[in-house]
Image: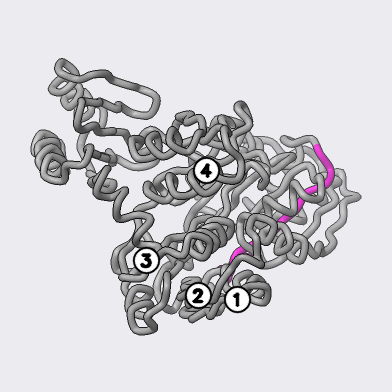
Amino acid sequence: MERLTAFKAYDVRGRVPDELDEELAYKIGRSFMRFIGGKRVAIGRDVRPSGPTFVEALSRGMTDEGARVFDIGLCGTEELYFATFNNDLDGGVMVTASHNPADYNGMKFVRELAKPISADTGLLEIGKSAVDYMPPAKGGGSVEPLESREAYIEHLLGYIDVDSLKPLKVVVNAGNGCAGPVVDLLAKHLPFEFVKIFHEPDGTFPNGVPNPLLKENREATRAKLLEEKADLAIAWDGDFDRCFFFDEKGGFIEGYYLVGLFAEALLSKTPGAPIIHDPRLIWNTLDIVEKSGGEAVVSKSGHAFIKAKMRDVNALYGGEMSAHHYFRDFSYCDSGMIPWLLVTELICREERSLSSFVEERQRLFPVSGEINLTVKDQRSAISTIRDKYEIDALGVDELDGISIAFDRWRFNLRSSNTEPVIRLNVEARGDKALLDEKTSELLDTLAPFKV
């Protein structure tokens, strides 16, 4: 086994047992405790068959470093975040591979207040320590269960006025991941009719990997919504730190437009607050935040960067077009449950359909959607695009890849951190034809670099 191949930019993730096994998990548990220098930590797992084995190995490693480990059991990643900050723990580890196939597993790490540990803030150090150096075990630690879900459900309900809600029919697709049990507990407090598909946790993922970003994985949700004539549908990835929306017509809503929607909804309750957004697509968000009296602040993409920027400016909310949504009152962490509670409250309060909130924004600021291209040379491809377009541009920004803006259109082009892929996003001001023209032009220029 190449022992560090599973260590990625933001987490540990790999195929079991080729890239990640029980022995490495034990060593990671020990290394993690030495890294954070604390004693009290939470641990949780998603639904994968290998999860209990990895929890046991991690916990054994932690207790061999003298840790007091609080096991919250089967949960979503945000429940691990919540247990860490709500119980004032020194850190936590979530055993999950999110939307990867069933034979993968992984880990997400946080320190106090659920602050993320990524490659930039110590993740690789944890990995190297686990592989290179293992001092004698101290022992003396312990493992005990922690019931955190009741407090977590109460916290979630605090984001909305439950008494203002009206009967809605909502299709929910948990993808056989971990979201189902949490939805069931929330449902007891809400006046909605839930139509459930792929609801039961099953780590073999009999209905396909829980990744609603794959178009083929959306059809079951869309079909059930149209069959039931529901008001909206919601789907989650495996550890439900992301949620995805379908309007009452069956339309899949790009995450970009939801950033503006949440900013508007939250600024109506807390005017003037900072709102964080990523630089890939920006015009719709800037327009809404300005009109809603907020302060738009851009951050490099990625949860570690977004969370750090939110803490820097005490932002009310942060959103990425990748469907990660972050909330100040959730210790600046991302949640896949808070967003749909806010959307349903907005629908009820405004007495409007979900499509009516986004269709006008889609017309005003049409987008290409993220286009991923596998290329031979990322640097040369991006340099060629820059050379062609920057001479006539209003400006070039290098915060995250390159963002090049003109009067009526702009684009962002960036490299993947983990694969030979470049990611293109294009947007325009109220001109779908211009958007299509410029997107095709960019793709033609990039064609010689494609694999």
- Residue type at mark 2 is Leu
The picture quadrant where one finds residue 298 is top left
- SS for tag 2? loop
How far, Cα to Cα, is label 3 from label 4? 37 Å
184 sits to left or right of 382: right
Q: Are the two marked residues, 3 and 2, in contact with CB atoms closer than 8 angstroms?
A: no
Comparing marks 3 and 2, which lies closer to the viewer?
Answer: 2
Q: Residue at x 66, y 67 (%)?
A: 163
Looking at marks 1 and 3 on the same chain, the residue that comes earlier in the sequence is marked by: 1
How far, Cα to Cα, is label 2 from label 1? 7 Å
Looking at marks 3 and 4 on the same chain, the residue that comes earlier in the sequence is marked by: 4
Judging by the rendered image, the residue that carries numbered circle 2 is 168
- Residue extending furthest toward the bottom: 227
Against 279, is 246 above or below?
below
- SS for tag 3? loop
199 sits to left or right of 429: right
Judging by the rendered image, the residue that carries numbered circle 4 is 7
Q: Residue at x 65, y 36 (%)?
A: 129
Q: Are the two marked residues, 4 and 1, in contact with CB atoms closer than 8 angstroms?
A: no
Q: Magenta stretch: residue 91 in it? A: no
Q: Are the two marked residues, 2 and 1, in contact with CB atoms closer than 8 angstroms?
A: yes
The part of the chain drawn in magenta is: 38-51
